[in-house]
Image (cartoon, rainbow, N blue to C red):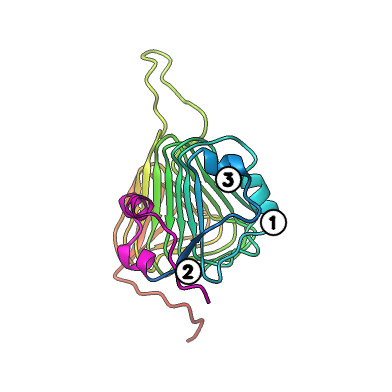
Amino acid sequence: MDTRDDMAPEHRERLRTAGAEADAIDALTWHRATEGVPQWWHDCDNALYLADGAFLPEKVLAQLTLFPVRDVVIAVGSALRTVSTLLVGGDGATVFVDAGCEITAGELFCGGGSSIVLHGPLIATRCAVVDARNGGSIVAGPEQLWASDVYVATDDMHRLEDRGTGERINPFGADIRLGRHVWLCKDAVVTGHADVGDGAVVAMRSVVRGQKVPAHSVVAGVPARVVRDDVAWSYDDQA
């Protein structure tokens, strides 16, 4: 096994600045990907790192390197054999996917100047969408459990403004933080500036939008409201 770590110090620091825990980065041995990556990708100061045992499907890699971008840093620490897409939509995007992440049929999109940080372990059972754009950021702590069709997005992708003042009234370049041991139930939505505390549960078809969810609480509804506090949830389904 190759024990040499190829990650440039400035890229390691950039991942930390984006919200990746130093211990998570340093726990893995990173290799700069060259196979399947076109020369222009390197010429434009982009970097794709894969840790030992990490993997991106050939189709996903081809899509990732299809459109011209610059100064992109991506570090993948998991074997993402069933991920649907990993796309960057502009210069300066930063993506960190830790070891222990399972994202079945999921879609990751990171726009220019934006960042996505997913710590492991993370289980996204099916069709999760993670979308950071307009300079926004998404940081998920360890021990995430996401049911099917979860949607985590910094922005609405289209401008909504007040006709009188011209002021934008929907999120733009928002920051999202999911604490440690968070459960997002089926069809849960987290968008806009949002902070979901450690041990929290976002109930089925609930919308957290520009809100702070207290740690160890259950929130439900549209918009989400606290329906139970001081809870602890488990991966095990038992009496």
**Residue at 52%, 29% in the rendered image:** 158
Residue found at the very far top of the displayed protein: 164
Q: SS for tag 3?
A: strand
- For label 2, the crowd category at 10 Å Cα-Cα, with few meaning under 14, some 14 to 19 and many 20 or more, is many
Asked if residue 172 lies left or right of residue 125, the reply is left
Indicate which label's residue lies in the foreground, 1 or 2: 1
Measured Cα–Cα span from mark 1 to mark 3: 13 Å
Question: Residue at label 2?
Answer: 99
Measured Cα–Cα span from mark 3 to mark 2: 19 Å
Judging depth in this view, the residue of 233 and 11 nearest the camera is 11
Q: Amino acid at mark 3?
A: Leu
Q: Amino acid at mark 2?
A: Ala
- Label ID, residue 58: 1
The answer to whether residue 108 is seen in the rendering is yes
- For label 3, the crowd category at 10 Å Cα-Cα, with few meaning under 14, some 14 to 19 and many 20 or more, is many
The answer to whether residue 199 is seen in the rendering is no
Image quadrant assignment for residue 118 = bottom left
